[in-house]
Amino acid sequence: MKKKRAKMTGFEVVISGDLAEDYPKRYTKIYIEYVLHGRGISPKSVEQAIKLSHTKYCSAMASLNALFEHSYRIVEDAR
């Protein structure tokens, strides 16, 4: 988001998941919610950053054999 010059004041990642019922109880599905705080953050920029994170930069996603779902939320700061 720095490359997009987004005016972010905060960032959170909320992660939850579903476990298999049988041992080893590995994660079968992982849900990720990105929460971005700031002003004038472009949804298109957020979507591009998430896509790059998932496909290019995140070694954990490449290593885990699970289905990933994600969403994002932009929290507009008061002026």
Image (cartoon, rainbow, N blue to C red):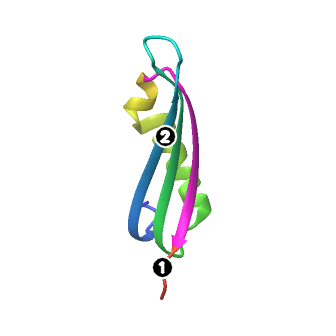
- Amino acid under label 2? Ser
Q: Picture coordinates of residue 62 (x, y %)? A: 44, 26
**Which callout, 2 or 1, points at the residue further toward the start of the chain?**
2
Dot 1 amino acid type: Asp
Secondary-structure class at tag 2: strand
Q: Position of residue 4 (x, y in %)?
A: 47, 63
The residue at 46%/43% (across/down) is 15
- Residue toward you, 2 or 12: 12
* The label number, if any, that marks residue 16 in the structure image: 2
Does dot 1 land on a helix, a strand or a loop?
loop
Q: From this viewpoint, is residue 2 visible?
A: no
For residue 63, which numbered disc appears in the image? Answer: none
The one nearer the camera, 33 or 59, is 33
Q: Residue at x 47, y 63 (%)?
A: 36
Q: Position of residue 8 (x, y in %)?
A: 41, 70
Residue segment shown in magenta:
64-75
Work out whether 59 lies above or below 33. above
Image spot of residue 67 (x, y percent): 57, 28
The local crowd at label 2, few if under 14, some if 14 to 19, many if 20 or more residues have their Cα within 10 Å, is few
- The residue to which callout 1 is attached is 77
* Residue drawn at 48 percent across, 40 percent down: 16
The residues tagged by marks 2 and 1 sit, at their Cα atoms, a distance apart of 26 Å
Residue 59 sits inside the magenta stretch: no
Residue occupying the point 48% across, 88% down: 79
Q: Quadrant of the N terminus?
A: bottom left
Is 69 colored magenta in this rendering?
A: yes
Q: Residues within 10 Å of mark 1 (few under 14, many from 20)?
A: some
Question: Can residue 19 be seen by looking at this rendering?
Answer: yes
Looking at the image, residue 70 sits to the left or right of residue 13; the answer is right
